[in-house]
Amino acid sequence: MTVPAVHPNPRPPRPRRLPALSRFGWLMALYAENHGRMARLFAPAGLGPGSYVSSVGDGLDVCLEVIEQHRYTTELRLTYAMTDPVTGEPDPSAWLRQYHDARQLEATHCYVGRRWQDVLGMYPPPAEVVGHRMKMNTFLGKWLQYLAERGHGVATLRRDSGPDREASKKLQKTA
């Protein structure tokens, strides 16, 4: 009588593969993750239009400007209280749109005058637009995480209504 040979380490059954997330799906997940981070960090949906500063004593104050507050969206600008020596503009700087109903936060562009059309041209392929948005919003997610780790948040946020801020806005309007 012959006994069949039994392999000492039989191969386990293969797990079922999960469907791959498309690049667009990945981008939407990134928007949702950034919304959660921003909501926990500064809760901008509850802020009125105006400028706010978060200071944790490290010399790198964070500026949050609530540009417009609408029923379903909030337009924001996030930057440090320092300027690029060449352009004179805040650097880094991210322009954001928060969608309250969809719970999404999108970085629409970074730096003044650098919208995706300025970077990619007027008629880029869709994959290039998605790739550019993924880069901007990955940067935003890492930046928000860094700010939280440094101690920035609702408790460190104060309204910035100083005379220097108002004078700078008047200069920008006349320039």
Image: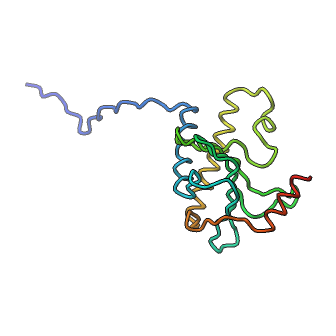
| Total numbered labels placed on residues in the image | 0
> How far across and down, in percent of the image, does residue 75 sit?
67, 46
Q: Residue placed at 77% from the left, 49% from the top? A: 111
| Quarter residue 160 falls in | bottom right
The quarter holding residue 109 reads: top right
- With respect to residue 82, does 117 lie above or below? above
**Extreme residue in the right direction:** 175
> Is 103 on the left-hand or right-hand side of 91?
left
**Residue sitting at x 70%, y 72%:** 59
In the displayed structure, 164 sits above or below 114; it is: below
Judge from the rendering whether residue 107 lies leftward or rightward of residue 169; answer left or right.
left
Q: Residue furthest bottom?
A: 57
- The front one of 133 and 12 is 133
Q: Could you say which is closer to the camera, residue 13 or residue 129?
A: 129
Locate residue 9: give its quadrant. Answer: top left
On screen, residue 88 above or below 56: above
Q: Quadrant of the N terminus?
A: top left
The residue closer to the viewer here, 154 or 34, is: 154
Tell which of 134 and 73 is nearer to you. 73
From the top left corner, tell me how far across and down residue 143 is, in percent: 63, 55
Question: Could you say where residue 64 lies in the image, as x and y percent from the top left?
Answer: 67, 57
From what the image shows, is residue 6 above or below residue 47? above
Residue sticking out furthest to the left: 1
x and y, in percent, of residue 29 in the image = 52, 40
